[in-house]
Amino acid sequence: MPVAIVAVAIALIAMPHDDRGPTDDGYLYAIYTDSESNLDVIDVYESHMVDGKATALSQRYRASDGAGGINESWKFNVKTGKGPFGAFYAAINLLDDGPLYDSDDAAEKRRSVSVGAVAYILDPSDLSRTLAGHRFSPGLYNAMLVVPTVYWLSEKAVAGKTEGNLVEGTKYNVLYLSSSPSYAPQGHGEVSGMKPYAHSASTVPGRTDFETHVYPYLGIGVYESYATVVGDAAGPGKLVSQSGRVPASDLDVDEFKDLADALEPAEGAGLRSDYQQWNFYQWTLYKMMCYAVMGSKNSQVMLGSGYTQGNQSCAVTGSTDAVGFAGTAESTRSASGATSSEDGRTSSKLFIENGWGSLNIFVGDAYVAGEAPSAQRLYAGNCLGGEKLLEARGQPPTTLTWADIFATGEAHRVISGTSAESALWDAPTSSDANRSAYTDPRYPGDIVNASEKGVSSITVGGRWDNAHYAGVSFACAGYDIALKNEYRGARLAYLMSEDAF
């Protein structure tokens, strides 16, 4: 796997769209973190294109000096629907055109009537409506956050001068994220060799490929996934992202893959679009997006508890539809029927709903294996459509360490260090028993957990009743890879070619 040295980076862009779909004008974000543990977000710098020329890197707002949520400079444009990373919300057809769409199509003509294609760009401030303000039938679509291709690379850098929060002579990790593989900000050397980790796919299971099959768009399910049943518009046995649903649980990672495989992607020449569970690189990109706009890795400090405390079941989807891209629902209904507006019992949203809390979400194409606590190692594939994981597996390469978290015999430890390699950026590598990090915006405050030996699945985000054992950074590989229970769910991803528009 490609290697580099880390920090955080991010991207925000919003451009008008042409007849085929929203486009991106070009950007580079440089996010600086501490050079030792890669935990503290020090500063975020940005360059963007103006009249075909790249501006100098300039400081963005940094929030992590204290709690307080997302600065208003990070927002979606209500006219274009575009936001950070050039992302936008879309309703994607689950079926080809037919009678079911007749009434839904009355107020606004769909952009495309083909299965797997974008039907509507959605209002980022109210996902129950299109960007033009019309309501639609949610059961006919997948609601997804669509992110144009992001390339990234990390390195070590020494600040040449004191500027913003950077101190001259101090070494930092810097992660660059960009809309192109090479980018030259004014007054700065060209940043080249960036790779599209989250937007690429291998066609050979067990092998990674970040160059051959690069997709222009990645869709991430706005909601925890629901499994359709007889009577649903899309028919039974499909994994979908829809508002107003009780998310699926009690399935293993391969059973969720089967449901994702039942979805029909867009057809066309060239690259083939395909659905899957989100994989390690796609989850990593989501974290980068969150860390950048928070100026911190501690989601519960910056945005609140989420749906994590005192709940008896997972959350029904959609209670955050009207909060914008970041916020907390006024009230949330649980799968068991109770409705609450109390702290810890309302769904959170940061780009997607319940990025922490409600269900532990499987990471597809990934597992952790090791025969000793200090030898936990990560496998992270990127196969188009995902891989079956409940098969005999060899040990991952010895260089890909997950975390030695049982050094003191104590499970559920706070993340104290993360990987500085580009491909594995932010994968947990060390942990600490210090609980004070829960309330410190300079640290994730989140838990990492791994098994003492054997092969384990990876779930992320945390669940509905574990309080601080949840957050954007939360990662658990502490259970056998075949385990399924009521706490575990899935999130849909969709690698999209131009034919999806």
Image: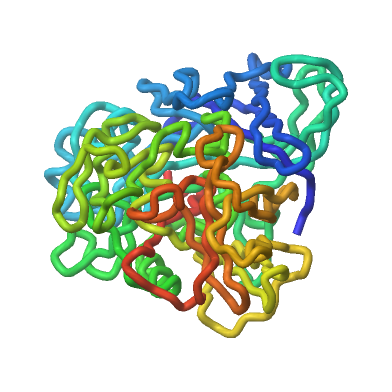
Q: Estimate the x, y position of residue 340 in percent, counting from the top left.
A: 19, 42
Q: Residue at x 57, y 45 (%)?
A: 285
Please tell me whether residue 306 is drawn above or below residue 129 in the rendered image. below
Q: Estimate the x, y position of residue 162 in percent, counting from the top left.
A: 80, 15
Whether residue 139 sits left or right of residue 49 in the image: it is: left
Q: Estimate the x, y position of residue 230 in percent, counting from the top left.
A: 16, 69
Whether residue 87 sits left or right of residue 407 in the image: it is: left
Q: Residue at x 66, y 60 (%)?
A: 403
Q: Residue at x 39, y 49 (%)?
A: 467
Please tell me whether residue 254 is drawn above or below residue 72 in the rendered image. below
Q: Nearer the viewer, residue 350 or 479?
A: 479
Residue 198: in sight, yes or no? no
Q: Quadrant of the C terminus?
A: top left
Q: Estimate the x, y position of residue 342 in percent, counting from the top left.
A: 24, 38
Q: Quadrant of the N terminus?
A: bottom right
Q: Residue at x 16, y 43 (%)?
A: 104
Q: Nearer the viewer, residue 271 or 252?
A: 252
